[in-house]
Image (cartoon, grey):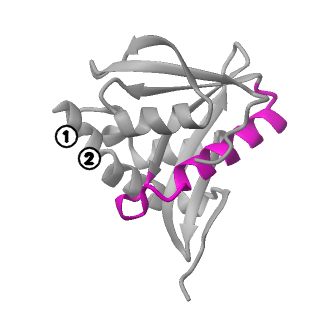
Amino acid sequence: MGMSVTISAATEQDAEQIFRLQYLCFQSEAALYGNYRIAPLFQSLDSVRAEVAADCVFVARLGEEVVGSVRGHVTEDGAAAIGKLCVHPRLQGHGIGARLLRAAEAALAEQRGAKRFRLEAGHRSEGNLRLYRKVGYATVGTAQGADGVPMIVLEKEAGAFATTA
């Protein structure tokens, strides 16, 4: 019998695994845009540790291995900025991303008072955009990433937690 993937709040001990997973997962995004200077590929381990300590960070585990991660924090306008959602390539397409989003949304609303959720996805990231729309996010605008990648900005109200993907 196989192991189940569990979702839990990240701990300081998870930072290095999150860092490595993020680097692995965002390679495909970099390739999609022909831009290997995207922020997730340049984030330092110390910066990941700081986010784990200060932000709302969840991980998906398969045994002891971190196979997914998501981060969020509440901004000045009461919205929760959610980002760096990633799932190990060998486990994508099994609902882990939606489960991570649901955990982050619940914690950000219940523990940190978020009124709505906001995230961004690259304009060519069709799989990511499909997931976000499937769990209730709607396009509210566009932005340009610091790395020059055109981004789609999506939001949903805090009462509309991710259902199933």
Question: Is residue 98 shown in magenta?
Answer: yes
| Residue at the disc numbered 1 | 31
Helix, strand or loop under label 2: helix
Residue 147: x %, y % from top left: 28, 23
Residue 95: x %, y % from top left: 54, 55
What secondary structure characterizes most of the magenta part?
Answer: helix
| Residue at the disc numbered 2 | 27
Badge 2 crowding class, 10 Å Cα cut-off, few under 14, some 14 to 19, many 20 or more, is some
Residue 37: x %, y % from top left: 24, 32
Question: Is residue 116 shown in magenta?
Answer: no
Q: Which residues are magenta?
A: 87-114
Residue in the image at 54% along x and 56% along y: 96
Confirm whether residue 57 shows in the render. yes
Q: Nearer the viewer, residue 97 or 61?
A: 97
Amino acid type of disc 1?
Answer: Ala
Between marks 1 and 2, how big is the CA–CA gap? 6 Å
Residue in the image at 50% along x and 56% along y: 68
Amino acid type of disc 2?
Answer: Gln
Badge 1 crowding class, 10 Å Cα cut-off, few under 14, some 14 to 19, many 20 or more, is few
Q: Nearer the viewer, residue 36 or 1?
A: 1
